[in-house]
């Protein structure tokens, strides 16, 4: 189904079965596969390939040479009907790649809304990226990586498969992330190490002084108290009862499987 208001350049190929909603713009030399759905107002600039079982939301801008929904690079993949799902209002810049999921990893690669993926960023199979995130130039996510809302991944940074990066994290450029990064933390290096709390980012997002003080106290408890995580967790639980922002640490540590950066 192609809405009458959709524009398709004469040089583009939109295969039978594709769904294009109102106001979709398909630029020169794009290829849209038969199981693709593209939401209203989304623009494919030129030379964009979207295939597989892929659903893209509304008002996204996708620049030239982007590939979405292609066969993933997991050698176990055997052409199962896995998917890519993308939200709304994302800016996906030149040469970004977003690969479909695997049967072993949940079957779907997900990108939320209001994200900026800069030139040549890569989102591998089964990754889940939240909302309002930035992946700078050449940022690379291995398979099964999870990125929380408002996270910033610096240019040339690689995140190891199965790692979890919490909300409001800022990871500096040229870093190698091989363990989980708790929420609110700034990290840098190869291998990445914590360098305090992302205070400026939190201020921009409206965190009040009381919450910021509580987050700093929780960070110090985790990283500077000399205590083991199992000793720290009950204290974080108590802090979260009066300071909800600390609850993000509690939930994150309960989820973490690879251990946190140190």
Image: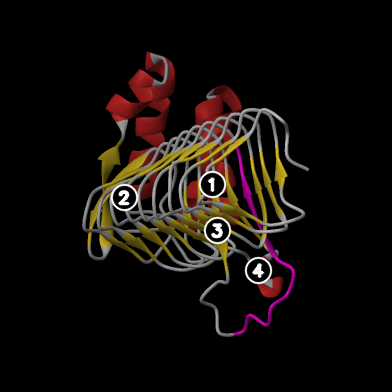
Q: Residues within 10 Å of mark 1 (few under 14, many from 20)?
A: few
Q: Nearer the viewer, mark 2 or mark 1?
A: 1
Residue at left 54%, top 51%? 12
Q: Nearer the viewer, mark 3 or mark 2?
A: 2
Residue 50 horizontal/vertical position (percent): 57, 56
Do the CB atoms of the residues marked 3 and 1 lie less than 8 Å apart?
no
Residue 119 is marked as 2
Q: Decide which of tag 2 and tag 1 comes sooner along the chain.
A: 1
Q: Which residue is mark 3?
A: 127
Q: Residues within 10 Å of mark 2 (few under 14, many from 20)?
A: many
**CA–CA distance between discs 3 and 2?**
18 Å
Residue 108 horizontal/vertical position (percent): 66, 59
Q: Measured along the vertical axis of the image, is residue 74 above or below residue 85? A: below
Under tag 3, what secondary structure?
Answer: loop
Q: Decide which of tag 4 and tag 1 comes sooner along the chain.
A: 1
Residue 64 horizontal/vertical position (percent): 39, 49
Q: Which residue is mark 1?
A: 10
Under tag 1, what secondary structure?
Answer: loop
Q: Which residue is mark 4?
A: 105
- Residue 220 shows in this picture: yes
**CA–CA distance between discs 2 and 1?**
27 Å
């Amino acid at each position: 189904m192609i809405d009458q208001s959709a524009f398709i350049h004469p040089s583009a190929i939109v295969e039978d079965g594709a769904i294009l909603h109102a106001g979709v713009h398909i630029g020169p030399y794009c290829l849209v596969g038969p199981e693709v759905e593209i939401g209203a107002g989304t623009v494919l600039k030129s030379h964009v390939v979207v295939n597989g079982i892929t659903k893209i939301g509304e008002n996204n801008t996708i620049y030239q040479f982007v590939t979405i929904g292609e066969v993933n690079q997991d050698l176990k993949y055997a052409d199962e009907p896995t998917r890519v799902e993308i939200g709304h209002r994302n800016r996906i810049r030149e040469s970004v790649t977003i690969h479909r999921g695997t049967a072993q990893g949940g079957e779907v690669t997900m990108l939320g809304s209001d994200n900026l993926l800069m030139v040549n960023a890569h989102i591998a199979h089964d990754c889940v990226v939240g909302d309002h995130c930035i992946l700078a130039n050449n940022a690379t996510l291995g398979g099964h990586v999870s990125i929380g809302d408002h996270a910033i991944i610096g240019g040339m940074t690689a995140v190891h498969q199965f790692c979890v990066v919490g909300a409001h994290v800022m990871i500096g450029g040229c870093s190698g992330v091989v363990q989980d990064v708790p929420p609110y933390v700034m990290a840098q290096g190869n291998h990445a190490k914590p360098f305090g709390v992302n205070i400026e980012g939190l201020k921009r997002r409206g965190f009040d002084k009381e919450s910021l003080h509580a987050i700093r106290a929780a960070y110090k408890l985790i990283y500077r108290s000399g205590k083991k995580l199992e000793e720290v967790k009950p204290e974080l639980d108590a802090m979260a009862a009066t300071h909800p922002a600390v609850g993000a640490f509690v939930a994150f540590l309960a989820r973490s499987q690879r251990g946190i950066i140190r």
